[in-house]
Image (cartoon, coloured by chain):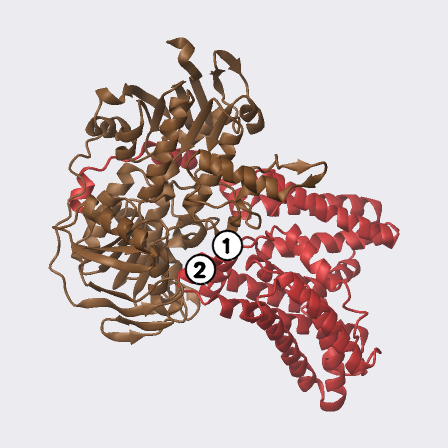
Amino acid sequence: MTQQTERSTPVPTSTNLTAIDDAKATPLRRLLHAVGVQNISLLMAIGVLLIIVGTQNPLFFTVGNLRVIGTAIAISGLLAVVQTMVIIMGALDISVGSIAGLTSVTSAMLFTSFGPALGVAGAVAIGVLCGLVNGCIIVFGRVNPVIATLATLAAYKGVAQLVSDGRAQGYTGADGFFVFLARGTIIGVPTLIWVLVLVAVLAHVLLRYTSIGRNIYAVGGNDIASRLAGISINRYIIGIYMLTGGVAAIAGILITARTGSGQPVSGSEGLELEAITAAALGGAALKGGKGTIAGTILAVILLGILTNGMTLLGVNSFWQNVAKGALLVLAVVIQQLRSGERRIGLPG
Amino acid sequence: MSEDIKLAARGISKSFGVVKAVRSVDLELRAGEVTAIMGENGAGKSTLLKILTGDYLPDEGVLELAGTEVHFTDPRQSRVAGLRVIAQEPEILQHVSVAENIYIGALSREGLLFNKRSTYARARADLSRFGFDKVIRPETLGSDLSPAQRQVVEIMRALVDEPTVICFDEPTSSLGDEESAILFALIRRLRDEGIAIGYVSHRMAEIFQLADRITVLRDGASVGTKLTSETNHDELVRMMVGRDLSQFFHREPVAPGEVVLELSGVTNEHVTDIDLSVRAGEVVGIAGLVGAGRSELMKTIVGDLRVSSGQISVEGVPQTFRAPADAVRAGIGFAPEERKAEALVLQRSVRDNISLARLKSLSRWIFIDSSKERALASTYIDRLRIRTPSPEQLVGKLSGGNQQKVVLARWLATSPKLLVLDEPTRGVDVGAKAEIYAIIDELAHAGVAVLVVSSELPEVLGLADRICVMAGGRIVGQMNRAEATEESILALAMDEKANA
């Protein structure tokens, strides 16, 4: 390279760019950049909601109500966190709700026969197995992830109804462990929230600081390039679906704990949509390669406050659904307009 | 003379944020002339073309078409006015035929129904009228087309509208010599019919073959316009880069070491009975026409395509690559032809892209050592002189030459035994090209075995110690650098094609 260096002339544009970037990088700008525009708009939306609901109903800011919000978002939050990882990888898992239902009912049934430890372990194993099936269908059957998990959404729900005969199973309301999960607190914060925080932090660390996380972004961003760079992308796809199944099983166990018995369908139906909504609202690009756990968690909180606030303000629950849908559309529209992509054809 | 000027752009400027992409550029395209537009990547050629078509609105300046001032706000308007730009990477519908791709938007119809037969007949007639009937068939599906054939479809689309001005944006970057020759003949015919032609290209040789007039851009501004007959290669390069590159491209062969890669009788659905060996410190060039199976052979070597019979050995050890990961482990690095589609994760940073193939060795257990990673990235940014504002810049925002250097950096970081480079300088400007040649030379000196596919014969001749010529999925001849000439390579590549 030495002979090369002598002929070198720095390209003016790139050096100019650096200079300008440095000049503009005030502490405030740097902070804004670190948090990200997406997250800032979510924080602002949360702020506006807090002001509106808080001024309308004094009950909103009580500790009791904040706990209600926290426990309400814990289960869908878990699914949103793993869904974010699936979406970053460029895929989608719409079977998570059904896996949660299946594991809810099996955890309660296993608990009845073998006690809480095996109830929990068995449910997680079943969840991971469901994820493995999803991954194998996608990788080896070459089925589009949406279609594959749409199929297993129906199939797993059916299995849950078969094993439970369509009814709630087991009674965990008297077991110390399940009661602790549902209503216990650690330093004043409900256990349910701790579970969400733990899973979210682990997912964040995995995505941000490990080679596994980096490769998930790479596979979602460009799967061909990732494969040619030596990443075993099939292993990643199957692995992430297994992880998703496992976390969905934890959500299923929490459903069992909260309701006191295993619920094949009623506690988990529609959770997949809430999870996808939160991930998209949090900035995960459905094309893959983009998204953060922080954004998803903010979106989960926003959705939780919105639901709770509307209930407190006496908004009819049908209208609540309309409002949530409208919010998702609004968020995605803003995201698309900001992305600066050419506005032609079907958006990606 | 002024009535000959079909398209005139005067004082065109366009900024994107703080970047002035184009600064008061003047351009005139005359009827019956080919005007080449030259400049390094980032010189503003593509932006200028997009302003001409109405994709971008200029901040300043006037655009005149046949003497009347025009303001295009949409590519459709420029098309209707008789101005067409042939895209470098045309959009082709994958699941419909060539004929339907050509007449997209204006299909033959009977009432409301699409008439397939008459569309095919029309396509066949039009293709043969322009001499493309040997290159492409109207029934072929879009997904089966080679890059060259996609280009042909795009050109046919333009001709259907009977434009008065046609601009080509580096049309030959994906074409082999045979297709290029056909394209040039076509462009000359269009010129003789009185169409004003703009021709953007990096390739000096074809500009001298084709252009009547040459406009040079540098850093977004026009440097000057010359008649081809009154200028030469060195002057143009100086105008483009503002420095003398006349001495670039001398590679001193290194005494080759042990055999690194050995293929014996390798066969699959794309290549047949390939015998090939590459030694440490040796640069082997693979020449051939588009469709000769060169890229497929490279992908077979790096484990992306399966070997059905025959044996690949690395340093004497027989290998069965089930996936590229196995080849990476065996010490093979691969820079594919389609940089954006197959090599880069565009929405991730330069740092991420450089470290991608060796993350494991930068990690403790699964945790990435970020200081090691940053050090690695800056080392290679400096060493390969990647022009990026910072290692955190998104790769998608770099120019083609710098993107290619990022791909090279990724593989250099793995300390490969063998580096497979498929068209390493495609779409790369002159300056970056010289730098990439220097990198390849340096690698050979360091004892890396290098396999280079290139459609530019001077590049193969300049780089390679040994040249293998491919045709029809086979290696049809090998020659040493001393005995190889452009003519002898081309003769082999084309002769075999006629026999096949």
Q: Residue at x 77, y 75 (%)?
A: A158
Q: Residues under labels 2 and 1: Cα distance?
A: 9 Å
In the displayed structure, would residue A95 be above or below residue B381? below
Disc number for residue A226: 2
Q: Residue at x 72, y 88 (%)?
A: A115
Mark 2 or mark 1: which comes first in sequence? Answer: 1
Asked if the residues shown at circle 2 and circle 1 are in contact, with their CB atoms under 8 angstroms apart, the answer is yes
Q: Colour of chain B?
A: brown
Image quarter hosting the N terminus of chain B: top left
Q: SS of the residue at dot 2? A: helix
In the displayed structure, would residue B74 be above or below residue A302? above
Please rate how many residues cluster around mark 1, counting C-alpha atoms within 10 Å: few if below 14, some from 14 to 19, many from 20. Answer: many
Quarter occupied by residue A288: bottom right
Residue at mark 1:
A221
Q: Position of residue B230 (x, y in %)?
A: 22, 20
Q: Chain of mark 1?
A: A
Q: Position of residue A320 (x, y in %)?
A: 82, 51
* Chain painted in red in the figure: A
Quarter occupied by residue B356: bottom left
Q: Type of residue at label 2?
A: Ser
Work out whether residue A181 can be spotted.
no
